[in-house]
Image (spheres, helix red, strand yellow):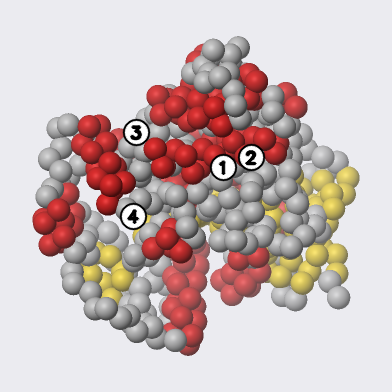
Amino acid sequence: MNSAVDAVAGQTVYRGQTSGNVDVWRGIRYATPPTGDLRWRRARPLEQESGTVDATAFGAAAPQEVNPGVPMSPDAIKSEDCLFLNVWAPAGAAGNDRRLPVMVWIHGGAYVFGAGTQPIYDGAHLASTQNIVVVTLNYRLGALGFADLGAGGSGAGGVSDSAAGGRYETNAALSDVLTALRWVADTIDAFGGDPDNVTVAGESAGGGIVTTLLTMPLARGLFHRAVAQSSPVTSVYDRARAAYVAERLTAAVGGTCGDIDSFAALDTDKVVAATMKAFTGVPAAHPGTIPFSPVVDGDLVPRHPIDVYRDGESLPIPLLIGTNRDEAALFKFMKSPLMPIAEPAIMQMFTAIATEYPEVSIPTAERVAAAYPGTKAKFWLGGRRVGERIAADMQARWGSFIRDGDPNSGLDSPASTWPTFTTDRRATLAIDAHDSVVDDLDGPLREAWGDEVLGFR
C-alpha cells in the first residue's frame, strides 16, 4: 500500500506517495492555466499556493488526437489546462540535506502528440537506479503551442501582436518549458533535488526543444547539462513560414486565409482538428517540412539555432547528442506524413532546398549514394538479453552524465571510453551489442554534402 510523502516548499506542502523505493508527486501545476485571456499567450508563473496540494494523480495532457504510436494511459484526460509536471525521487530524498542531480525530461511527438504522463516516461526506475530526481512535464502542442497567429493575417492580432505582451504571442510551448524550468530552479530542492545540477533532456520534438533552448538567452542559468536524442535541430522556422501555417489553419476550418481572430476563438476540438489537417497537409504540399516547430521571432528565439551554433554562441553547456541508425524508418511504420518516401516528393523536397540555398551545390545522387555503405538484406538482432544490457548501459552512461558530466563514470568497466567530441577527431560512440568509438562516423556523407547545414527556414 502506498503511503503519503510530503515535500515542503515555503508555505506549500506537496503531498505525494511512496511507491516501493521511490517517492512520486504527480500533477503539480507549474504555471497559470493557459485558458481564457491567456489562450495563445506565453505561460505565466503560478502564484505560490499555501496549504497542502494533492499531488497523487496526473494532470491533464495537452489536447491532441489519439495516436497508436504515442500510447497514453487508459485513464488519461486532455485539456487546455495542461501545464503540469511530475517528480520522482529516491525514497526519503525530500527533506534530506543531501541534494541529488535532476533530470528534466521533455517528451517527443512531432510537436503535436505526447505528454509527460505517458507510461513509457515513468521516472521510477531511472530515479532509483541512478539516484537522481526525475521531472517530466506537459507543454502545449500543435496550434495551441506552436502556431504564430500574429505572423500574418487581417485579424486584430497583426504582426505586432506576436511579440511578448501582444494578443497572440509566439512560441507558447517554449515559454511553457522555460516556466517549468524556473519552477524547478525555485522548488526542486524541496523534493531532494539540486537546483545547481539540472540536466534538460528530450527526444525527437523534445530534443528539438533542447537544442533550441541552448540558443535562447532567457534559458541561461536554468540548466547545466543537456541531452538531445534525435533532435530535429534544423526544423525551426522563420515568420514567413509561420504565416503560411497560420493561413493553413484558418483554411482548414473553412475560414478565409488570414481570418485569425475567428480561428483563435474556436473551441478546443476544432483547433485540434485544424492542427491535424495542417499536420498532414503541410508536409504533403511541402515535403520535408513540418507544420509546427519553434519559430525565430527575434524575441524568445532571437536567431535560428543553426546560425547560433555555427557562430559558437550557444550556451556553454555540455551536450550529449545522438541519433538512432535508420530511425526515420519509424515514420513509415507509423504511416506518418512527415517523411517523404515517394520519388516525386523527394525530388520536390530537394528542389525546394536548392531554391532556398542557391549558393549551395547539391551533390549528385551518385555521390550521396556512394557515401552510404552497403548493407546486407537481413539484420540479425541480438535478442532480448542484448537489448536489456544495452538499455542498462545507456541508463548508466546517461545517469553519470547527469550526475557529473562524464558518461563514462557510471560504468564499472566500460567496453569503450566515450571521449569528448572535437572537430579534429569527431569521436562518436556507436552503441550496439558491443560498443565502439568511431572517428568521424559519417565522414563520407558529411563530405558529400559539404559544410552547409541544410534545412528549411
Mark 1, Cα crowd under 10 Å, few <14 / some 14-19 / many 20+, is many
Question: SS class of the residue under badge 4?
Answer: loop
Residue 56 location (% of width, % of height): 81, 59
| Viewer-nearest of discs 3 and 2 | 2
| Viewer-nearest of discs 4 and 3 | 4
Q: Are marks 1 and 2 in contact (CB under 8 Å)?
A: yes
Residue, far right: 51
**Which residue corresponds to the image point at 17% horizontal and 31% vertical from the top-left?**
358
Give the alpha-carbon distance from disc 2 to disc 4, as whole Å.
26 Å
In the image, taking residue 429 as reference, residue 275 lies left or right, namely: right
Mark 4: which amino acid?
Ile
Give the mark, 2 or 4, whose residue is nearer the N terminus.
2
Give the mark, 4 or 1, whose residue is nearer the N terminus.
1
Q: Which numbered disc covers residue 276?
A: 1
Q: Which residue is mark 3?
A: 457
| Viewer-nearest of discs 3 and 1 | 1
Mark 3: which amino acid?
Arg
The quadrant in which the N terminus is found is bottom right
Question: SS class of the residue under badge 3?
Answer: loop
- Give whichever of 395, 346 is nearer the camera: 346
Give the alpha-carbon distance from disc 3 to disc 2, as whole Å.
25 Å
Q: Which residue is mark 4?
A: 341
Residue 178 location (% of width, % of height): 57, 39
Give the alpha-carbon distance from disc 1 to disc 2, as whole Å.
6 Å
Residue 300 location (% of width, % of height): 49, 29
Q: Which numbered disc covers residue 272?
A: 2
Mark 1: which amino acid?
Met
Mark 4, Cα crowd under 10 Å, few <14 / some 14-19 / many 20+, is some
The quadrant in which the C terminus is found is top left
Mark 2, Cα crowd under 10 Å, few <14 / some 14-19 / many 20+, is many
Residue 156 location (% of width, % of height): 60, 12
